[in-house]
């Protein structure tokens, strides 16, 4: 099997693992033999990319612990959300410059839990994405439909709408700063398709369902990226063929290989199964084998 865009395994710890637990998790990975030769080999040239997205209070400890283990090129530490402004009156938020100060340059954006519980929208996700990319961050941007939307046969309509609104807002943010998206910006963007009905429910999308949605997203990018599409929507979008699309929603060490066998699934964004070093390690090993 070969994966043209490599494989990205990202663990989303959500509101779990404070500093002590974060350190224990990383020490646990080391005790289990991370990184194996296969993982080290696959991580060269970044064919395999691995990351943990940790609570804000654990970022500094996790980053330091990764460095102490000598894994800075093997395992990234990222934020679960990051504001688009650099500083100011935004209680409870962190910004890119604040994160850079502690060596963090990767962030998740637009997770469905941020949308569901904290009022985030495609527009705010688009602004965050643009701001972060322009500041040298890597971004994992999440989209996905809810269960009623899927049951009503609206999956593709919802994905189109989300992609359109996110990239419209991202483009507007760049324009407001006198900037334009370049290949270098887009090379730092990863998309994550996370059907909301599959998150934390144990109801994983089948490989067929995942492939169908991922292929649709790639097709949408192809269309929007053409001269006609761009002129119609005045949109700048990431390149369809090189942008990785991760699947998220009840990924486990048992179902990950089947998902990775799909041509348009380029990795996994994993919640529950990323919380224990044993299962996270299995996911990374599965990723290495799929390359
Ligand atoms: P889950 O979460 O793997 O626990 O379903 C995935 C996510 O929300 O990113």
Image: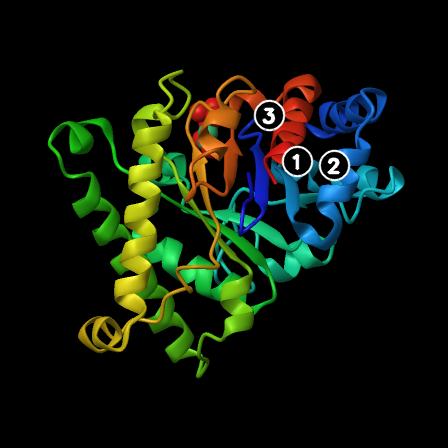
Q: Residue 15 location, x and y as percent?
A: 55, 28
Under circle 1, the secondary element is helix
What residue is pinned by disc 3? Answer: 274
Quadrant (top left/top right/bottom left/bottom right) for the C terminus: top right
Under circle 3, the secondary element is helix
Q: Residue 215 location, x and y as percent?
A: 32, 46
Q: Earlier in the sequence, mark 2 or mark 1?
A: 2
Q: Which residue is found at the position 48% from the left and 21% from the top?
A: 255
What residue is pinned by disc 1? Answer: 288
Residue 25 showing in the rendered view: yes
Q: Tally the numbered discs.
A: 3
Q: In the image shown, does 135 or 50 lie closer to the viewer?
A: 50
Q: In the image shown, does 113 or 249 lie closer to the viewer?
A: 249
Marks 3/1: CA–CA distance: 16 Å
Q: Nearer the viewer, mark 3 or mark 1?
A: 1
What residue is pinned by disc 2? Answer: 39
Marks 2/1: CA–CA distance: 6 Å
Q: Which residue is found at the position 72% from the left and 23% from the top?
A: 21
Q: Residue 66 location, x and y as percent?
A: 80, 39
Q: Residue 88 location, x and y as percent?
A: 52, 62
Q: Which residue is found at the position 54% from the left and 63% from the top?
A: 187
Ligand 1 has an atom within 8 Å of the beta carbon of the residue at disc 1: no
Q: In the image shown, does 90 or 44 lie closer to the viewer?
A: 44
Residues under numbered marks 3 and 2 in contact, where contact means CB atoms less than 8 Å apart: no
Q: Nearer the viewer, mark 3 or mark 2?
A: 2
Q: Earlier in the sequence, mark 3 or mark 2?
A: 2
* Label 1 environment density (alpha carbons within 10 Å; few <14, some 14–19, many ≥20): many
């Amino acid at each position: 099997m070969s994966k043209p865009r490599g494989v990205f395994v990202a663990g989303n710890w959500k509101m779990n693992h404070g500093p002590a637990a974060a350190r224990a998790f990383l020490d646990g990975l080391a005790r289990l033999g991370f990184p194996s030769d296969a993982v080290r080999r696959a991580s060269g040239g970044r064919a395999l990319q691995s990351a943990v997205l940790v609570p804000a209070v654990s970022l500094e400890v996790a980053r330091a612990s990764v460095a102490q283990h000598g894994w800075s090129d093997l395992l990234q530490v990222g934020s679960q959300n990051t504001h688009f402004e650099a500083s100011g009156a935004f209680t409870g938020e962190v910004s890119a410059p604040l994160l850079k100060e502690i060596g963090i340059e990767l962030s998740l954006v637009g997770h469905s839990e941020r949308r569901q519980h904290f009022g985030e929208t495609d527009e705010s996700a688009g602004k965050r994405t643009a701001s972060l990319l322009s500041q040298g961050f890597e971004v994992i941007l999440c989209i996905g439909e809810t269960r009623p939307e899927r049951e009503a046969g609206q999956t593709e309509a919802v994905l189109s709408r989300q992609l359109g609104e996110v990239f419209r807002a991202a483009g507007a943010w760049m324009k407001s700063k006198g900037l334009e998206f370049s290949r270098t910006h887009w090379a730092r963007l990863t998309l994550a398709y996370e059907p909301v009905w599959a998150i934390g429910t144990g109801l994983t999308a089948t490989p067929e369902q995942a492939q169908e949605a991922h292929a649709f997203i790639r097709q949408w990018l192809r269309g929007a990226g053409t001269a006609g599409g761009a002129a119609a929507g005045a949109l700048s979008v990431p390149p369809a063929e090189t942008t990785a699309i991760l699947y998220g929603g009840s990924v486990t060490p048992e179902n990950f290989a089947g998902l990775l066998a799909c041509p348009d699934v380029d990795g996994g964004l994993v919640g529950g199964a990323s919380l224990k070093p044993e299962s996270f390690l299995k996911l990374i090993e599965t990723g290495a084998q799929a390359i």
